[in-house]
Amino acid sequence: MQMQLIRDLARERGIKAGRLSKINLVREIQRSEGNFSCFATATSGDCDQLDCLWRDDCFAAAKKAAN
C-alpha cells in the first residue's frame, strides 16, 4: 500500500503521521484497531493473521528489513 493511503488511514483514526516510517505508522494503526502491532515482523514468512489488511506489504517489508 502506498504511503499516502497509509497516512489517510492514520488520519481517519486520529493518528498523526508526522515523520513516522511506514513500518511504525502501520504499527500505530494496528494498535489503534486493537490488533497486534506486528507489521514487518514475519521474517520467517509465517503469519497466522490471514485476514490482515497489511499481509502482502508485511512480508515484503519483513524481507527487506532482514536483508
Image (cartoon, grey):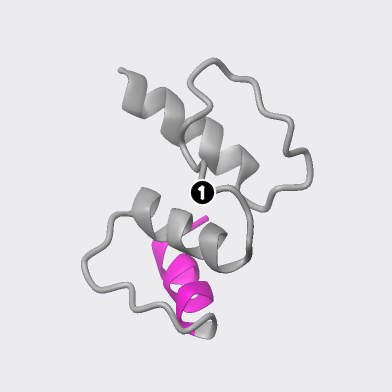
Question: Residue at the spot x=52%, y=41% of the render?
Answer: 38
Q: Which residues are magenta?
A: 1-11
Q: Nearer the viewer, residue 25 or 6?
A: 25
| Residue denoted by label 1 | 37
In the rendered image, residue 52, in percent from the top left (x then y), is placed at: 70, 48
**Tag 1, which secondary structure?**
loop
Residue type at mark 1: give it: Ser
On screen, residue 16 above or below 30: below
Magenta portion: prevailing SS class: helix
Q: Left or right: where does residue 48 sit relative to residue 31?
A: right
In the rendered image, residue 57, in percent from the top left (x then y), is placed at: 53, 42
In the rendered image, residue 1, in percent from the top left (x then y), is placed at: 52, 55
Picture quadrant of residue 63: top left
Q: Is residue 67 magenta?
A: no
Question: Residue at the spot x=43%, y=35% of the render?
Answer: 61
Q: Left or right: where does residue 64 sit relative to residue 58?
A: left
Q: Quadrant of the C terminus?
A: top left
Q: Nearer the viewer, residue 21 or 5?
A: 21
In the rendered image, residue 41, in percent from the top left (x then y), is placed at: 47, 31
Q: Is residue 6 magenta?
A: yes
